[in-house]
Image (cartoon, grey):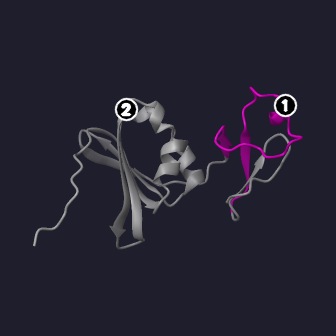
Amino acid sequence: MVKNTLNIGRISEGFVLDHIQAGKSMDIYKYLRLDKLDCCVAIIKNARSNKMGKKDIIKIECPLEMIDLDILGFIDHNITINIIENETVVRKKALTLPKEIRNVIRCKNPRCITSIEQELDHVFILTDPEREEYRCKYCEEKYQRK
């Protein structure tokens, strides 16, 4: 019996995002704006994982400075980032909740200045790390995770 295998080649410079909650890889693709970059991206959904049962993995081949990885801490700080140089993992980066996020989520308060001033950045500040709570910098509206 022949087993089906999936081969995705090595990347020379870039990132491997591992331990992504199963089904969340497309959200990360969108948040990182990978569709706007001219780089090679491989998304593996529902891979078997001893630790998580199922997980997603994203391989991104691009120069290291092209992507802001801090946003990943907001999405899911359990993601592991493997930084690749010369086809080798040179370091792993652990994520934390970012203290501030800019232009990732939008304030839902219709009275907020960001609703009126269209060019104003949407800035959210981490106000309660225990509850992973963010509030709008301008009106202090709490961001509700889905």
Residue pictured at 77% horizontal, 28% vertical:
118
Q: Give the amino acid at mark 2.
A: Pro
Occupied quadrant, residue 57:
bottom left
Query: Given the current orientation, which residue lies at the most extreme left position?
Result: 1
Q: Whole-Å distance between the Cαs marked 1 and 2?
A: 37 Å
Would you call the spot at circle 1 few (<14 residues within 10 Å), some (14-19), or many (20 or more)?
few
Please check the rendered image and state whether residue 138 is part of the magenta-colored stretch, yes or no.
Answer: no
Q: Is residue 73 above or below residue 40?
A: below
Query: Given the current orientation, which residue lies at the most extreme top position?
Result: 119
Occupied quadrant, residue 22:
bottom left
Q: Which residues are drawn in magenta?
A: 100-129
User: SS at mark 1?
Assistant: helix
Please check the rendered image and state whether residue 125 is part of the magenta-colored stretch, yes or no.
Answer: yes
> On the picture, is 1 further left or further right than 56?
left
Q: Image quadrant for the C terminus?
A: bottom right
> On the picture, is 21 further left or further right than 97?
left
Query: Given the current orientation, which residue lies at the most extreme right position?
Result: 111
- The residue pinned by badge 2 equals 63
User: SS at mark 2?
Assistant: loop
- The residue pinned by badge 1 equals 116
User: In the rendering, at what x and y percent does residue 80 appear?
Assistant: 43, 56
Residue pictured at 81% horizontal, 28% vertical:
117
Judged by depth in the image, the label closer to the viewer, 1 or 2, is 1
